[in-house]
Each structure stands twice: as C-alpha cells, then as structure tokens.
Amino acid sequence: MSSEEQKLAEIRDRIDSIDQQIQDLLNERAKAAQDVAHIKLASDPQAVFYRPEREAQVLRKVKERNTGPLDAESMAWLFREIMSACLALEMPLKIAFLGPEGTFTQSAALKHFGHAVTTVPLAAISDVFQEVESGSCHYGVVPVENSSEGVVNHTLDMFLNSPLQICGEVTLRIHHNLLGTQADLSKLRVVYSHQQSLSQCRGWLDRHLPHVERVAVGSNADAAKRAAESDGVAAIAGVTAAELYGLQVLAPNIEDEPGNTTRFLVIGKQAVPASGDDKTSLLLSTRNEAGGLHRLLAPLAEHSISMTRIESRPSRRGNWDYVFFIDINGHRDDPEVAEALAALKAHAGMYKVLGSFPKAVL
C-alpha cells in the first residue's frame, strides 16, 4: 500500500468513527424527544408538540455557532431534518398545502417542517384553511406573495373570516426548470406550465424556443404530468416535480428574474410565543376619510415600530370600503409592540391580530 493509500485509509477510518458517534448522538437526541413526549402527555393529553419559536431559536443558534467548512445554511438544513425526524417520534404531523403533488407550496412545506411529515395536497387555498380549522391537518401552508407577481389575494381574503393564526413564514427562491423526456429541444412542440411560470420565463422561451406553443395549465405539477405522458412535450416546473414524474431537467433555472422569491405562510390554531426575532401580522380598517390611515398607523411611528408590509383589500362590507393587511417587526407580547397595538385597537374600525411568528430562518 502506497503512502497516499495509507493516508486515505486512515481518513476513511476516522470518518467511520465520526459517523458512529453522530449516529449514537442522533439516537440519544431522539430518545430525549421521546422523553419530552411522555412528560407532556402525562400532564396534558392534548399537548402541543410542535413549537415554532423553539425550532427557530435552535436553527438560529446552529447558524450562529457554525464555523465551517459546511456553510451555515447547509448546517441549518441538516438540523431541520433532525428536528423533523425527532418530532415525528413525539407526534407525526399532517400538513395541508395548495396542491397537487410537486408544487412549490409542497417544497415550502417540506423546507419549513422537514421531510418527516405527511403532506396533504388540496385543490384550493380555502380547502387548506378548512382542513386545518376542522383538525384534519395540524397546519397548512399557503402562498401569500411573490417578489415579481405581487400578493396572493385569495390568501389574504381568507383571513377576513378565518379563526386561524399565522404560525410561521417560509421564503422559497423560485427556480424554474424546463422538464421533459425529450433531450433534443428542437423536437419540442409544446410547453405546459402555470400562467405565472410562463410569464416569469418569457424571455428565455423567446430566445430558445420561439416557435414552440405555450399552453397555460392549472399548476406546474399538472404540466409535469402532461410532459411525462407525451413525447415532444415539455413542462416548466421545479425539481420536486421532476423527481415525482420521472422527468429530465432539460434546462435549469430558466426564470428571467434570478431573485424571484415566493413567501408562504404557515397557518394553525395556536398562538406562538416570542422567539426573539419575530413579526406580527394585523388586519385593520379605518373610516374612509382624509388622513384616516395616517392617524390609524401613527402609534407605530410613536413607538418606533417598523412596518414591513401593507396591502389593501376590499372589505366586502360595502363599496369603496377597504381593510389593510399589515406586517410589523416584533412580537405582540413585546412591551413596545403591545402598547402600540393597544393604541391601534382604540382607533381601528376593525382590529385583528392574525398572529405573531418567528421570521423565516432558512
């Protein structure tokens, strides 16, 4: 054996030893999670096991103490999956999402909860809310805004009457890929995708497939399914859809805007305690009069509370009557935020806290 082969053998032996230690520690962590479950169930048969604020704190610490060579995001992703597997030993979670299988919303759900959950595809955003409200699913994941296409109005409208809380947020960089079974692009006849995806890839399609027909369908997953069933057909979708339907990635990352990002909300029944780096979402209305919105929001400025987003939507209570969806920095239990919210409530025609939740960590 050469000296190089000897060095490689020694390193591989060290890797095997480290792997054994990692495996032992993972099982030790899993056992601790089971102990937590037993203690919780002994005192409360309806105990809540998923703690968004606790998981956010753990992932932040993982990123802060990371020294490489693995980057902080990769390390946090590994811990996300470890926590997911351990939580499944305590209470397996069912997560509703806007389907079908293979959509970006499913990818967002798995990014937030890890892969040790059962994801349940549903046909409409309203169905996701209904499944969580009824208790058929523990949580739901729905899209709320895209950096290039704007807000998802249906999601905002659902909060007008829903009792559900926002428990978390997920941001997902949207990479569109050309998928198919035919590697020769010159033989493609048609490209299927959701209308938004076709719009977000228009420049690439104009340059590379100018003579190929573009057909909008209900979802990118539906497009991938069609591509898997026919020759000469391609789809624009994510890698999850490629894996699900056995398609090749014919061209990766064909979106015209490299920074294209979609934000998703995690909805559930319980209020989330403060994690140390949070947002609060509000639903407000004011009288339709000059300066009404300025006076309504003045307490935020007076208490130095930053507003990160504001959207208006028809209230459906009368013509030209609007409600405002607002995100602010901080948790509703933070003293300054609590004082500002009390002043807001006193002046608002409609006042509803949709939830305080940890800012996206991954």
Image (spheres, grey):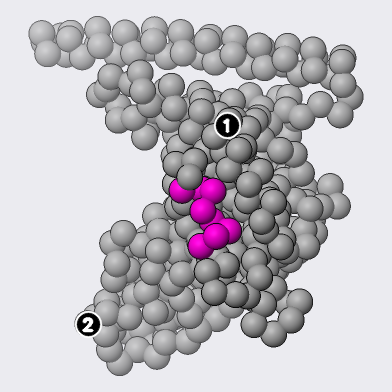
Q: How crowded is mark 1: few (under 14 residues within 10 Å), some or many (20 or more)?
A: few
Q: Position of residue 353 (x, y in %)?
A: 68, 49
Judge whether residue 66 can be spotted in this image. yes
Residue 286 in picture, x, y percent from top left: 64, 66
164 above or below 271? Answer: below
Q: Residue at x 46, y 13 (%)?
A: 22
Residue 162 picture quarter: bottom right
As shown in the figure, which amino acid type bears the numbered disc 2?
A: Arg
Q: Left or right: where does residue 95 sit relative to residue 76?
A: right
Q: Residue at x 62, y 37 (%)?
A: 338
**Which is the main secondary structure of the residues drawn in magenta?**
helix
Q: Which amino acid does label 1 sit on?
A: Asp
Labels 2 and 1 touching (C-beta < 8 A): no
Q: Name, please, the residue furthest toward the left.
A: 3
Label annotation for residue 52: none
Q: In which quarter of the image is the N terminus?
A: top left
What numbered label is drawn on residue 334? 1
Query: What x and y, as percent, mark residue 34?
Result: 72, 16
State how far apart marks 2 and 1 are (Cα).
Answer: 52 Å
Q: Is 295 contained in the magenta span?
A: yes
Residue 155 coordinates in the image, percent (x, y): 63, 64
Which residues, given as a range, are shown in magenta? 294-301
Q: Which mark is residue 207?
A: 2
Q: Is mark 1 on a helix, strand or loop?
A: loop
Which residue does the image show at 59% across and 13% down from the upper left?
Answer: 29
Quadrant assignment, res 356: top right
**Mark 2 or mark 1: which comes first in sequence?**
2
At x 47%, y 87%, the residue is 215
In the displayed structure image, the side of residue 8 where residue 23 appears, left or right = right
Give the number of the mark in front: 2 or 1. 1
